[in-house]
Amino acid sequence: MKGYSITEIPEKSAIARVKETDISLKDAVNIAHFLRGKKLERVRDLIDGVIEKKTPVPYFRYLDSVSHKRGMGPGRYPVKAAKAFRELIDNAEANAEFKSLNMDALVVKHIAASKGRMIKKYTPKAYGRAGANFKDLINLEIVLEEVEE
């Protein structure tokens, strides 16, 4: 992943990226979909709620055997992935503060999770065989845009 997946970055915006974090791609995709288009303050509250297991993340994809939560449908509390997103949001917020953007008017313009590098490991088995134990790392990116109200 050389650059960002968004082609046009707005002029009054702050961007951040977390590369090769060890979280689930399925959880990351659903969290990104959950946060897209919301204000920064709301996003911070939602992520903190997920980490405290008070706010479930609604799942719209990868729904096999995902149980329903009251009043919202299928959802889970992906705490490990939410902590990675919290780090991403903190970085973007610090970048926005450095650029002197209005913190109350920031909205998540773009947020994405994509596959990164694969770590290949092998577990020895009986009779000289080996079992593959591969792990995908995940890249996260966010663009916060200042909107006039």
Image (spheres, rainbow, N blue to C red):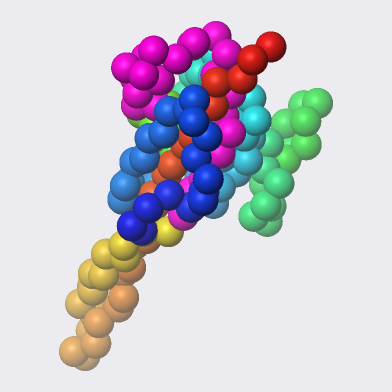
Q: Residue lying furthest right in this view?
A: 71
Query: What residue is rendered at 34% in x and 41% in y?
Result: 18
* Total marks placed: 0
Q: Residue lying furthest front in this view?
A: 11
Q: Does residue 83 lie above or below 147 as drawn? A: below
Q: Does residue 104 lie above or below 18 as drawn? A: above
| Res. 26 visible in picture | yes
Query: What residue is rendered at 36% in x and 40% in y?
Result: 17
Quadrant of the image occupied by residue 101: top left
| Res. 55 visible in picture | no
- Residue 106 left/right relative to 63: left
The quarter of the picture where the N terminus appears is: bottom left
Residue 4: image x %, image y %? 43, 49
- Residue 35 left/right relative to 18: right
Residue 127: image x %, image y %? 21, 90
Q: Which of 144 and 64 is in front in this view?
A: 144
Quadrant of the image occupied by residue 87: top left
Span of residues in magenta: 90-114
Q: Nearer the viewer, residue 83 or 33?
A: 33
Residue 108: image x %, image y %? 57, 29
Query: What residue is rendered at 55% in x and 21% in y?
Result: 146
Query: What residue is rendered at 42% in x and 59% in y?
Result: 115
- Residue 1 left/right relative to 51: left
Residue 28: image x %, image y %? 50, 44
Q: Which of 57 and 100 is in front in this view?
A: 100
- Residue 102 left/right relative to 19: right
Say if the magenta span includes residue 107: yes
Q: Residue lying furthest bottom in this view?
A: 127
Say if the magenta span includes residue 54: no
